[in-house]
Image (cartoon, rainbow, N blue to C red):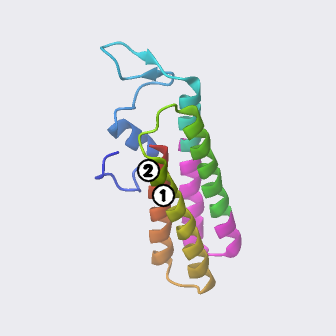
Amino acid sequence: MSGNLSPEVGLAQRFSAEGISAPLGKSSKGKGKAVERPFGEDLIKAQSDQLFKRLDEVADKLFRFPSQRVLEEYKGVVRELLQQVQGMLQVRQEFSMTSGAAFRLITRVHEGLSQMEKVLSREAKRVKLMKLANDIKGCLVSLLA
């Protein structure tokens, strides 16, 4: 994955930047012809696009109205994304990251969520919440890429 893309860049733009911009069911890899991709990959990509959109919406709500209820909603979306990562790892037969790297990213997501709870409980600055949310989103994007 390219290191110059920020976590704020949409998932579809990240896939496009990585050369995965083919229509559903097709891959742009190959010698001039489209090659079929497994249906599961397309389904996971569509679901992750939807979940990242929802993650952005809930994060925005959390920044505007920080509360324990909204934080729980945010954590629920992150949990869904992590479950999807697990499913994607099972669908893909080849995974470019080592399992240790994936574990470190998942650990960072959990640490970020824990820090968000602490920040919210102390009613700290919203900028800190935004940074943590972007860091978590970046880890999730890296896991799904």
Is 60 inside the magenta-drawn segment?
yes
**Corner quadrant of residue 12:** top left
Mark sitting earlier along the chain (1/2): 1
Q: Pick out the residue farthest to the right.
A: 69
| 80 is higher (above) or lower (below) than 68 | above
Magenta-drawn segment: 49-72
Q: Position of residue 129 (x, y in %)?
A: 51, 73
Marks 1,2: beta carbons within 8 A: yes
Taking 104 as reference, is 76 left or right? right
Front in this rendered view, residue 43 or 104: 104
Secondary structure found at label 2: helix
Magenta span: predominant SS is helix
Instruction: Identify the residue position indicated by label 2 in the image.
Output: 142
- Amino acid found under the numbered disc labelled 2: Ser
* Residue at the image point whose x is 64% and y is 55% from the top: 79
Count residues near mark 1 (Cα–Cα under 10 Å), then give few for <14, some for 14-19, many for 20+. Answer: some
Instruction: Identify the residue position indicated by label 1 in the image.
Output: 105
* Residue at the image point whose x is 61% and y is 76% from the top: 117
| 31 is higher (above) or lower (below) than 76 | above
Is 67 inside the magenta-drawn segment?
yes
Secondary structure found at label 1: helix
* Residue at the image point whose x is 43% and y is 16% from the top: 35
* Residue at the image point whose x is 49% and y is 45% from the top: 144
CA separation in Å, label 1 and label 2: 8 Å
Q: Evaluate whether residue 78 shows in this view.
A: yes
Q: Position of residue 36 (x, y in %)?
A: 48, 17
Front in this rendered view, residue 141 or 51: 141
Taking 16 as reference, is 38 left or right? right
Q: Where is residue 119 in the image (x, y as percent from the top left)?
A: 56, 80
Of the 4 image quadrants, the one containing the N terminus is top left
Front in this rendered view, residue 117 or 110: 110
